[in-house]
Amino acid sequence: MKIHRRNGIDLYCFENLEVFPALCHGITTRQGGVSQSPFDSLNMSLHVGDAAHQVAVNREAVWAGFPRPAEPVFLNQVHGNTVVVWDGTAPAADRRLTGEADAIVTDQHGWLLTILVADCQPVLLHDPVRSVIANIHSGWRGSIADIVGRTVTVMKTRFGCNPDDIYAGVGPSLGPCCSEFVHYKKEIPESLWSYRVSENHFDFWAISQAQLARAGLRPAHIEISGICTRCRRDLFFSYRAAHTTGRFAAIVGMTPKA
Ligand SMILES: [Zn+2]
């Protein structure tokens, strides 16, 4: 990943995605905002106990780094496996889509699909041929449910995407160093036990890589950030490091059509 500073805010960008001129994307860090501890400082979530007016300041600072008049859209994330196809109809006043979903797919320009995380994987997808984007919230429950593969299936069936054309970025999230599952025999299906890297640590980055490849993406089109949020809690929010903490944002959009 590369770091770009926009409007004074650092955004981590995937090198395989930033080559597409119609695409705008970035992943925020916890730095550069106004929220107080334990949400310091660039908390993007209104649902973790932080003061709403400070989150609003943080969000505006981030949106200002993206092309206007692109508007953000949020999901009600619930660690499920629902993929919503969005047609660009205006969301509610708080910019959240109704219903619950953990992945969003659209072919509409001018919207910033936003996923909020702190250890879970944000996975960005882009098909530059069909002009389709997706943003996925894939925690360990999402990984088990293969929400990444389900999202690629939706891109194929609804928009005629060829997986061969799709590019993917897996953002900062819990690495194999910190993905400890003491009760994995109850929580994680046996089919994924081969991704154990020690007695009870799992490599969920490798699981996503395999799921994307199984969905038909070329390995060369998949970029894994390799940044562990718990190890780098100076840079990112980590739920495992501190349960009361903020959320950072993964954002992807297609620039508004002139
Ligand atoms: Zn780690």
Image: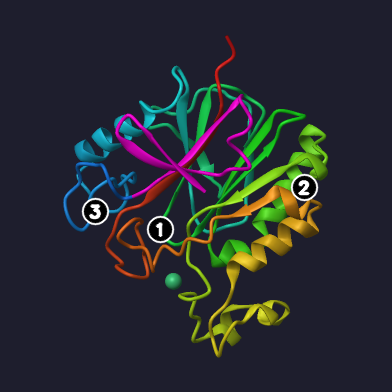
Whether ligand 1 has any atom under 8 Å from the Cβ at mark 2 is answered as no
Near-viewer residue (246 or 226): 226
Closer to the chain start, of discs 3 and 1, is 3
Foreground pick, 22 / 89: 22
Which contiguous range is marked in magenta? 1-29
Q: Relative to residue 218, is residue 65 drawn left or right?
A: left
Query: Looking at the picture, which amino acid does disc 2 mark?
Result: Thr
Q: Is residue 144 visible from the viewing direction of this image?
A: no
Q: How many marks?
A: 3
Secondary structure beneath label 3: loop
Q: Amino acid at mark 3?
A: Phe
Specify whether residue 239 is in view: yes
Could you give the CA–CA distance between mark 3 and mark 1, rounded to whole angstroms? 11 Å
Nearer the observer: mark 2 or 3; the answer is 3
Q: Which residue is mark 3?
A: 39
Q: Which mark is residue 153?
A: 2
- Which mark is first along the chain, 3 or 2? 3
**227 sits to left or right of 7:** right
> What distance separates the C-alpha of mark 2 from that of mark 3?
36 Å
64 lies above or below 26: above
Give the number of the disc on residue 118. Answer: 1
* Residue drawn at point x = 49 percent, y = 75 percent: 179
Label 1: which secondary element: loop
Task: Locate residue 61, reporting x and y percent.
Answer: 30, 31
Extreme residue toward the left, this view: 36
x, y percentage for residue 78?
Answer: 49, 55
Disc 3 crowd rating (10 Å Cα; few below 14, some 14-19, many 20+) is: many
Is 9 magenta? The answer is: yes
Q: Is residue 164 left or right of residue 53?
A: right
Report the amino acid beneath label 1: Ala
Seen as rendered, the residue at the extreme bottom is 199
